[in-house]
Amino acid sequence: MDNTKIRNYQIVSAIFVCILGTLLHFTYQFFGENNFVASFSAVNESVWEHLKLLFFPMLLTTIIGYFCIEKNAPNFLCSKTLGIITSMLFIIIFFYTYTEIIGKSILLIDIASFFVAVILGEYLAYKLMISNLNCNNIIAIIILTIILICFVVFTYFPLKIEIFRDPVTSKYGITKNIE
């Protein structure tokens, strides 16, 4: 196993996720509130929509890395899946914990937590890749597919629960009519 190649890929992956995730915050508006772009871009300021900014770039680096790194780390897919889940859970837990403690959301803390979540997820994935983790790629694929479907479906049909509520407008999901 070539740990240097894996480590370097994870570093590049983290940088890529940070950059693309930041850009995805603005793509829905930039592309004129396009319904297709809404599937993988934030359509409002809810926590759920911000999780897309992490999930889709990490999914992309997982797909690319599967073809570039998998031979060096047979547990690549499972490791990346666990990294993605950990990153998403960090954002959810951190956001709701700190906003409950101080009573409000602070943009700078939200942005910093995104970057911390990316680094945490990519680091965990790296550590798992160089470990003896034994896993089933089919289960990882199923989990990633379910998460992907949830992001798309809940963009258009969000549940009326807090994670889907836009704190700015108090609305859920896309606020314009879907054509």
Image: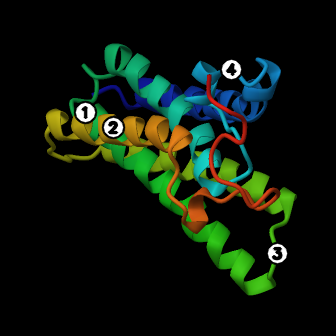
The reply to whether the C-beta atoms of the residues labelled 3 and 4 are less than 8 Å apart is no
The reply to whether the C-beta atoms of the residues labelled 2 and 3 are less than 8 Å apart is no
**Disc count in the image?**
4
Q: Earlier in the sequence, mark 3 or mark 1?
A: 3
Residue at the image position 28 percent from the left and 42 percent from the top = 143
Kindly identify which residue carries mark 1.
Answer: 141
Amino acid type of the residue tagged 2 in the rendering: Leu
Residue at the image position 27 percent from the left and 28 percent from the top = 1
Q: CA distance from mark 1 to mark 4?
A: 28 Å
Q: Earlier in the sequence, mark 2 or mark 3?
A: 3
Question: Which mark, residue 144?
Answer: 2
Kindly identify which residue carries mark 3.
Answer: 104
Point out residue 152 in the picture as x, y percentages from the top left corner.
47, 35
Kindly identify which residue carries mark 4.
Answer: 34
Question: In the drawing, does residue 41 fall left or right of residue 70?
Answer: right
Asked which quadrant contains residue 62, the reply is top left
Asked which quadrant contains residue 17, the reply is top right
Q: CA distance from mark 1 to mark 2?
A: 5 Å
- Toward the top, the furthest residue is 67
Q: Which is in the foreground here, disc 3 or disc 1?
A: 3
Point out residue 119 in the picture as x, y percentages from the top left corner.
59, 47
Q: Nearer the viewer, residue 52 or 64?
A: 52
